[in-house]
Image (cartoon, coloured by chain):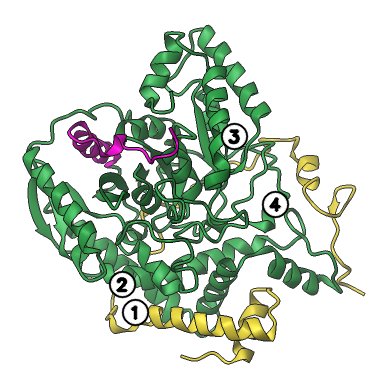
Chain colours: A green, B yellow
């Protein structure tokens, strides 16, 4: 059961081979058995999940089954879910029971899916190793001494260890694609504005985007079918006709032009990872794709630009945590200012405080033009690099991360080294483009991901290109030992 | 760019975060590193480039101002540490 695809689970439910209650109980049992070893979940509530499963079984009985009806899905703890503790990985929200559903959550509810629990994550999604969570670090199922990547490390570990058939995640600078790469999964960050951000706890609002984390491109397509769509409650949600991302997923890719950016193969890329990416390119050639050289000359500026824009937006977004209306409030204080400052000192972790302070500094009087405005200008240059590249190719291919998973603690004390984990993913967030990571090989039994980047709203194409690779390879079927 | 502890404390205060002397030293070192990274931007000529605030050029949508959920008041107030009837309670700010 744990290895079934979403399609197989859906078909099995339809054919009454098993009920939603049985599937949900099966995964809850696996959670009970394995979660302690990887710490992938912050909140599990068997009673709530099974109640949802019973409702799903009723829907199936009435013949109103959709693709995901009855299937348990793990939800990143960044999505508000009514009646569920929603922490965003922070002590600040340890006591926060959400009074409402995020749009993503209500879409899964309306599709009849079961909420299997809330997954661990870097605090407020700030991190690339899941070591900044208030709830302890997540361990990579492929080697529990290693990090799963971040910030969606809990979602990645949960799906990799087969504790959930699929999970939701979010990506501000690589938080879906890098953990997908490090845990051997397929993860998609959609075009900015495709998935509603309503009820998704804000980090950097002009970059944040939710997407699926699954074993295969086909599963991602089924998840995106539920997650995507215009939402009037998110002012940056895009109005456009809803697509079926499963349509055309098997289309042949003969003649597809794949652009290889030379900047993605420069210094910093692990040579073994590079070899696997080269093998992937060779495989695509065999499948009929045409390889073209392209250049993204400003890619090296994406990290500096990101570390101005994201902290600036974060410092503004996180000002809401003041201890007044919800969340943590310090126990003893002299006056209002003292209450604010102590609440935020005690409620936020080190990395979050650091980023709030950077954001505060770059936005402070006298520095705005030199930092924030400058960063926004370079953001345009980075974005224009992509527009030029897409005149020469249909999709861009490169590594998702510069290395495989690394030992827990390895980069924790050196933020600059940690930030380099996102060197190939951040530019797509700055440009607002969709990006996908899929497993393409192993180094010393640790997964390596290939990244595919597409033009705006080309999710269907990306999923098609990834699916054709997966029809001709087995990397996405591999699972870590010790979880069978 | 080097931060003095006084500057760090000023930034921390603007961010409404308490910080002690030991932390200020530690934070100073890390912020300097990050600022060094950010300063790579100065090498780029951006004359005449329009700043980009958002990925897609969209105009701000307008909607009617109407109540969509009318049962939210008590649910929301219940999340606070201290309330009185329909009010959030904070330490006294006006004498």
Q: Are marks 2 and 1 in contact (CB under 8 Å)?
A: yes
Q: Are marks 4 and 3 on the same chain?
A: yes
> Dot 2: what SS?
helix
Q: Are marks 4 and 2 in contact (CB under 8 Å)?
A: no
Q: Is residue A151 above or below residue A365?
A: above
* Residue A469 on the magenta segment: yes
Which residue is under mark 4?
A94
Considering only order in the chain, which callout, 2 or 3, is on the residue closer to the N terminus? Answer: 3
Q: Are marks 1 and 4 on the same chain?
A: no
- Pinpoint the chain carrying mark 2: A
* Residue B68 on the magenta segment: no
> Dot 3: what SS?
helix
Q: CA distance from mark 4 to mark 2?
A: 36 Å
> In this rendering, would A269 be left or right of A342?
left
Q: Residue at x 49, y 35 (%)?
A: A163
Which residue is under mark 2?
A301
Q: CA distance from mark 4 to mark 3?
A: 22 Å
Mark yes or no: residue A209 visible. no
Which residue is under mark 1?
B41
Which residue is under mark 3?
A32
């Amino acid at each position: 059961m744990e290895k079934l695809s979403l399609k197989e689970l859906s078909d099995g439910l339809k054919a009454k081979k098993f009920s939603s209650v049985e599937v949900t109980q099966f995964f809850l049992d696996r959670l009970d058995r394995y979660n302690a070893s990887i710490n992938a979940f912050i909140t599990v509530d068997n009673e709530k999940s099974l109640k949802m499963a019973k409702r799903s079984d009723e829907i199936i009985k009435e013949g109103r089954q959709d693709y995901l009806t009855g299937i348990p899905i793990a939800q990143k703890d960044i999505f508000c879910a009514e009646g569920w503790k929603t922490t965003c990985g922070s002590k600040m929200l340890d006591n926060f029971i959400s009074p409402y559903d995020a749009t993503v959550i209500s879409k899964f509810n309306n599709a009849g899916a079961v909420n299997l629990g809330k997954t661990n994550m870097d605090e407020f999604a700030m991190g690339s190793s899941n070591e900044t969570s208030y709830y302890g670090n997540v361990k990579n199922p492929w080697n529990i001494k290693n990090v799963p990547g971040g910030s969606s490390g809990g979602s990645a570990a949960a799906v990799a260890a087969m504790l959930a058939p699929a999970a939701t995640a979010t990506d501000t600078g690589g938080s879906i694609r890098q953990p997908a790469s490090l845990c051997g999964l397929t993860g998609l960050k959609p075009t900015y504005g495709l998935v509603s951000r309503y009820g998704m706890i804000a980090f950097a609002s002009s970059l944040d985007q939710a997407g699926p984390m699954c074993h295969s491109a086909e599963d991602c397509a089924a998840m995106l079918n539920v997650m995507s769509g215009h939402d009037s409650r998110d002012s940056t949600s895009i109005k456009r006709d809803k697509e079926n991302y499963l349509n055309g997923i098997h289309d042949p890719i003969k003649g597809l032009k794949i652009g290889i950016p030379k900047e993605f193969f420069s210094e910093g890329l692990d040579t073994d990872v590079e070899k696997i990416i080269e093998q992937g390119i060779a495989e695509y050639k065999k499948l009929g794709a045409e390889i073209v050289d392209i250049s993204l000359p400003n890619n090296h500026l994406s990290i500096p630009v990101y570390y101005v824009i994201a902290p600036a937006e974060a410092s503004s977004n996180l000002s809401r945590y003041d201890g007044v209306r919800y969340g943590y409030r310090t126990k003893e204080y002299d006056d209002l200012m003292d209450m604010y400052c102590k609440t935020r000192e005690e409620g936020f972790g080190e990395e979050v405080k650091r980023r709030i302070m950077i954001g505060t500094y770059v936005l402070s009087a006298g520095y705005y033009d030199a930092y924030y405005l400058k960063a926004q200008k370079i953001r345009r240059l980075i974005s224009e690099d992509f527009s030029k590249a897409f005149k020469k190719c249909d999709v861009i291919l490169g590594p998702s991360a510069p290395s495989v998973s690394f030992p827990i603690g390895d980069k924790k004390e050196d933020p600059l080294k940690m930030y380099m984990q996102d060197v190939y993913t951040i530019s797509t967030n700055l440009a607002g483009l969709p990006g996908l990571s899929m497993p393409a090989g192993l180094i010393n039994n640790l997964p390596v991901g290939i990244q595919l980047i597409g033009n705006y709203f080309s999710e269907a194409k990306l999923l098609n290109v990834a699916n054709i690779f997966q029809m001709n390879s087995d990397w996405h079927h591999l699972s870590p030992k010790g979880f069978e | 760019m080097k931060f003095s502890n006084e500057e760090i404390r000023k930034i921390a205060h603007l961010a409404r975060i308490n910080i002690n002397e030991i932390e200020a030293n530690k934070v100073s070192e890390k912020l300097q590193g990050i600022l060094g990274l950010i300063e790579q931007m100065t090498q780029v000529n951006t004359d005449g480039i329009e700043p980009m605030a958002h990925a897609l050029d969209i105009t701000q949508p307008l909607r009617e101002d109407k109540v969509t959920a009318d049962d939210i008041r008590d649910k929301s107030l219940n999340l606070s540490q201290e309330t009185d009837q329909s009010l959030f309670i904070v330490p006294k700010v006006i004498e």
